[in-house]
Amino acid sequence: MNCRGCAAPLSLPLIDLGTSPPSNAYVHADRLEQAEQWVPLKVAVCQQCWLVQTEDYTSADSLFDAEYAYFSSFSSTWLAHAERYVAEMVERFGLTADSRVVEIAANDGYLLQYVAARGIACLGVEPTRSTAQAAREKGLEIRELFFGRDTAAQLHSEGWGADLMAANNVLAHVPDINDFLGGFATLLKPTGVATFEFPQLLTLMAGAQFDTLYHEHYSYLSLTAVQTLCERNGLEVFDVSQLTTHGGSLRVFVQRKDGQRRAVQPAVQQQLQAELDAGVKTAEYYATLAPAAERIKHELLRFLLQAKADGKRVVGYGAAAKGNTLLNYAGVKPDLLAWVADANPHKQGKFLPGSRIPIVAPAQIDLEKPDYVLVLPWNLLHEVSQQLAQVRQWDGRFVIAVPELSVL
């Protein structure tokens, strides 16, 4: 396979997580007798542009279909993050009622609702039918399309040249990353700004966050790789900031190379230097992840097996994609993890892909009073432990598996 960024041959394997169904392919109860599509999950590193990426086995159409079940609005933490983002962008870039904002991967309108509330014209691009419909129900204008140069040209011809383009947690999800970025150069006004947010490679590696690797994430991004990709597609990175979301993310600010250019901020070179110092341009840097994943798998299995031997009941919370990577890699089934609770009604009543663990409503936790709650979206541990504070009333404990098994 060749690099999807620069087309150089991929020669450096990062990790092989075996085979599993796509992490968001939740199973309907009436389809339990049907076989799932199990797909290899292998990640490699390009030693030319240092883009970390999955090997190609699945198409975007099959991953982001009409039944895509990730709805951003079911996380209060993520809603608060979106509201802060809008306030910061309005203040920093002077957005007014005459401005135009376009969000790529608008999901269920979790962010654009705050743009619309300020009286700013906005448009969402969202290819998944279920979330697009939820956004429309908020009164938002949504185009049910995948984004790239052709879609950008179409929207530009309709008068949607953008002062601000937002792309939160989508850059890693696109198979043709050059076409995707080229669309931003097409749709941005000469004075426009685009922001990309994505979990950053440095924290993935430092925290052994192998569970953030899944089929829907085609790329795992450093600023080193993103800057190269942007330059190739008519964009310039002019600022970057650190975020706590998803266990450690970057927000990258870009502008058109042929537009009204802002000064490049010192934070850009600081981040690039931090990545260079960490070793992102060396093969040795990538050698630690696979052994760490193996250790985490063994720690989790030891805990679950011991809990079962002791007659303790363990359940999960959060039917998140990262949890599915973890459970399928470890081979966990309902005999060790009885069920997983999730606040998203679109997931309740279904089963996790691969493991076939049932998904229930959070009320089941109060009914059964389990001894342990394994929080699969560990990045939301604080939010979850507050929402489920009653667990401690019956001496229940919270558990996370990454970066190491912790009973809290």
Image: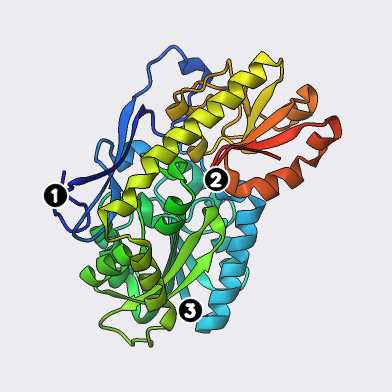
Quadrant showing the C terminus:
top right
> Which mark's residue is nearer the viewer, 3 or 1?
1
N-term mark: 3 or 1: 1
Q: CA–CA distance between discs 2 and 3? A: 27 Å
Looking at the picture, the colour scheme in use is rainbow
Name the residue tied to disc 1.
9
Q: Verify CB contact (< 8 Å) between mark 1 and mark 2.
A: no
Q: Quadrant of residue 363?
A: top right
- Badge 2 density bin: few <14, some 14–19, many ≥20, Cα 10 Å: many
Q: Nearer the viewer, residue 31 or 173?
A: 173
Q: Nearer the viewer, residue 303 or 96?
A: 303
Name the residue tied to disc 3.
99
Q: Is residue 29 visible?
A: yes
Name the residue tied to disc 2.
71
Q: Amino acid at mark 3?
A: Ser
Compared with 191, 78 (above or below) is: above
- Find the residue positioned furthest to the top: 33
- Find the residue positioned furthest to the right: 393
N-term mark: 2 or 3: 2
Element class at badge 3: loop
Dot label at residue 192: none
Q: Is residue 337 left or right of residue 164?
A: right
